[in-house]
Amino acid sequence: MSVLNILRTRFFIKKDKARQNLAPLYVRITLHGQSLDVSLRRSIDIEKWDTDLGRAKGKREDVRIVNDYLDNVRAELNQCCTELKLQRKPVTLEAVKDLFCGIVPLGHTLLGLMEYHNNSLKHTLEWGTMKNYVTTQSYVKLFLERKLKRADIPLNELTYPFIIDFQVFMLNHRPTDYHIPCGHNTVLKHIERLRKMIAVGIRNEWMEKDPFAKFQARFIRKERQCLDSAELAAIEQKDFQVPRLNWARDLFVFSCYTGLAYCDLMNLKPEHISLGMDRGQWIMTARKKTNQPLRIPLLPKAQVIIQKYQGDPRAAFTGTVFAALSNQKLNSYLKEIADLCGIKKNLTFHLARHTFATTVTLTNGVPIETVSKMLGHASIRTTQIYAKVVEKKVSQDMGALRAVLAEQSKREDTPLRAIVGNN
């Protein structure tokens, strides 16, 4: 074997960095004709160092301890060389140094995985969804920096305690900017997105274990807000002096009578409206979010709004039924509408979809299976969330049941009364 391929070590001190006559110890490793100095993070009295031998001089116990340490360092460096060869990895000065210092190449990391996931899906996910993944990524980065004091973490170091620590960190985190702290369900949404990204790493075989194997998310079920019939009527009948508010109101009311989500409303085209099996006008399209088919008969109030905006040049330019309006601006206008109509609820466009599910359909006796189809839900369990808040419908159903039971009771009591009367 060539002398150049043998790892050589030489110990020395740096007197120019000495403090109070104590100089730091270094080892110079040489391989392939190149050298690299590595700090041993120890110091020695300059008077006790033999520069020629590269060892401590003397026979005292403290000198013997230093020389034993240097022998161990030399043995460890040679062992590092051996390990690299056994692992069929390149034997370089940097590789030997990293292995000796305990610096292991990160390989696939958590932030690297998140970047890979977001870059892969940025052209297929809606911006609103993609924005949420980016927010989750920023929170994970903040957790690594503040809690773990690390810039990144290898995927194989992810464990169940890591998930729990992240959850606790999010629950206790108090933003210093205008953002509000995350509530319980919001934190679980971030963890849910983290779980989906880690699943990509597992499918790609970048990690051996699933840190979420024992994790269970327990969301706190909250009632979905909706407008009652009086609040909906107040918005419908209000005449706004500002055209943009009338426009925003019409879009909102149209969704209240069709159940269309914002993105489906903005993508609605004239060809999506055709004659249904009852020879009436139906919306026939698919939800952009889930690709579930939508088959919605148009109610008269929705038809009036379509007719109102026929011939709108802005809509004609985009080839849609309604002119484009950003969700941010639309929600901003709805806040003004709520104030002018005296509505205290947080009026957002998505509230129209909740109103369709409850006030317009379920409350008026439309079966939940039918509502589920019109909303484009993949499972009726999603629609049942709306059914829980329809107290008026429950009252009507129970009222009808009382009437039926009362009628049955009268029929059952009649023969007995007749017998008593005859006696």
Image: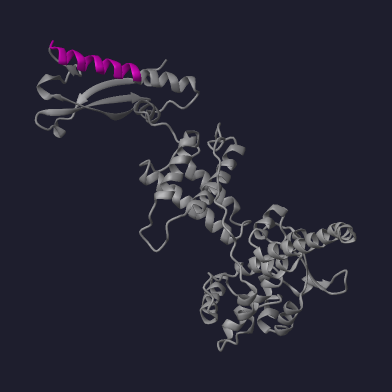
The front one of 416 and 56 is 416
Residue 404, percent from left and from top: 80, 61
The front one of 113 and 375 is 375
Residue 247, percent from left and from top: 62, 81
Residue 260 visible somewhere in the drawing = no
Name the colouring of the figure.
one colour
Looking at the image, residue 263 sits to the left or right of residue 114; the answer is: right
The residue stretch that appears in magenta: 59-76
Instruction: Say which residue appears at 12% left-offset and 24% top-offset.
Output: 45
Please identify the residue farthest to the front as the structure is shown.
423
Vertically, is 177 above or below 12? below
Looking at the image, residue 68 sits to the left or right of residue 76; the answer is: left
Vertically, is 136 above or below 305? above
Q: Which quadrant of the figure contains the N terminus?
A: top left
Q: Which quadrant of the figure contains the C terminus?
A: bottom right
75 part of magenta stretch: yes
Vertically, is 75 above or below 310? above
Magenta-drawn stretch, dominant element (helix, strand or loop): helix
Residue 333, percent from left and from top: 54, 77
Q: Quadrant of residue 303?
A: bottom right
